[in-house]
Image (cartoon, rainbow, N blue to C red):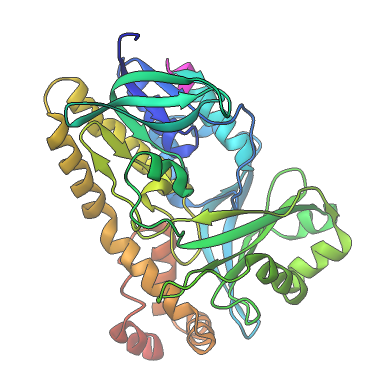
Amino acid sequence: MNPPLDALVIGAGPAGCAAALSLARRGHSVLLADRHEFPRDKVCGDALIPDALAALGRLGIDAQVLAGARRLARLRIHAPDRSHVDIDGRLACLPRRVLDARLRDAAIAAGARFEAPLEFVGVLRQAEAVRGAVFRRARGGEPVEIPARITVLATGAAAAALEAAGLCRRKAPSGMAVRTYYRHEVLSSEIDYLSLSFDRHTLPGYGWVFPGPDATFNVGAGCFASRGGEAVQNVRRLFEAFAESFPLARRLAAEGERVGELKGAPLRTALCGAEVSRPGLLVAGEAAGTTYSFSGEGIGKALETGMLAAEMAAGHLDGAVPAPELARNYAAALRGRYAQRFAAYDKAQRWLAHPAICNLMAARARAGRYVREQMQAMLAETGDPGALFSARGLVRALVG
């Protein structure tokens, strides 16, 4: 067996790349592994909202990663009654095939080594701690052991990797989303905003139309599991309903050139469904449930948690923090930073599932200051996201 690496990062999406880049910059030996060769597709809305852009800035790679991205300055939220409200913000859209490849390249440039395809099948243990992982280079192939002093699991929402690591506490996802792409030159010059729709045909789900580079549009729909835990409804039927009922999606389908398959993926939200740490093992990104409940957006929090995992892992690699203490500290840090915010997003999703409330919020955002200011703060993450979606917030919405 080879000498152990300092860090093994499993999954080369935003969370894994942020962790690998950050650790490599600190001078640690890092292997970034992924089950797919690059470039590879990833089902996503492709939107980069303020938290993602800020995270790229903190990593110092925003200019190189965002080259050619579609820059936007508004989010348009459509209510069930077909009214809408515009929220200003610094936004962008870039296909994940491009985004993830550029993030991986940045991690390699920082000194990380990349290997793919490597299929994660389990962890290596030494005493009570995780000390690396076992992979297969091809399905059914011989196992490959890669020892490491610290392992970061950033494999996304699919349950298989969490189960293989012994961390899965809920196999069913929080929700499902599907998306496809259209190209439409005329609409691309007309639409300069992200559209998020709470259409009456899709509630309690949602739909989106996000303009990207090269006159393309990412069009998709998502839905969430019920509170009782029943299976998520057929999201492809939800997409069909959205594409038929939402005017912008309907026009793209009728007039545009379809340039992508309709693909689906699970969602993990609200820090639910998995343990986020064990001695020697930290979980980052959507594997830890860091996706927003009401919109399915998760790139920003994936980048943030990847950086957090790297920052805290560095203390262990430098000899200052024992592995059991690192695991406890990381879990506490995730809860401290995100639990309250994600609980508020989960509440917002449940409130917005009711057409009457959704219509009221849109109307009050147009007529008064309070709701608009709260929506602006939610997008920019400058305020308490739970303030609006509460009994007190509803009263203020009616008068403010």
Farthest top residue?
Answer: 2
Q: Nearer the viewer, residue 296 or 130?
A: 130
Identity of the residue drawn at 67% across and 56% down: 179
Q: How many marks?
A: 0
* Magenta stretch contains residue 109: yes
Q: What stretch is highlighted in magenta?
A: 107-112
Identity of the residue drawn at 52% across and 27% down: 104
Query: In which quadrant is the N terminus drawn?
Result: top left
Q: Which of 5 and 303 is in front in this view?
A: 5
Q: Nearer the viewer, residue 192 or 41?
A: 41
Q: Position of residue 373 (x, y in %)?
A: 41, 71
Residue 25 seen anywhere in this rendered image of the structure: no
In the picture, measured across the screen, residue 284 lies left or right of residue 95, that is left
In the picture, measured across the screen, residue 32 lies left or right of residue 83, that is left
Q: Nearer the viewer, residue 49 or 6?
A: 6
Q: Position of residue 382 (x, y in %)?
A: 34, 59
Identity of the residue drawn at 48% across and 82% down: 361
Vertical position of residue 64 compared to residue 301: above or below? above
Q: Position of residue 139 (x, y in %)?
A: 58, 29
Query: In which quadrant is the C terminus drawn?
Result: bottom left
Residue 247 seen anywhere in this rendered image of the structure: yes
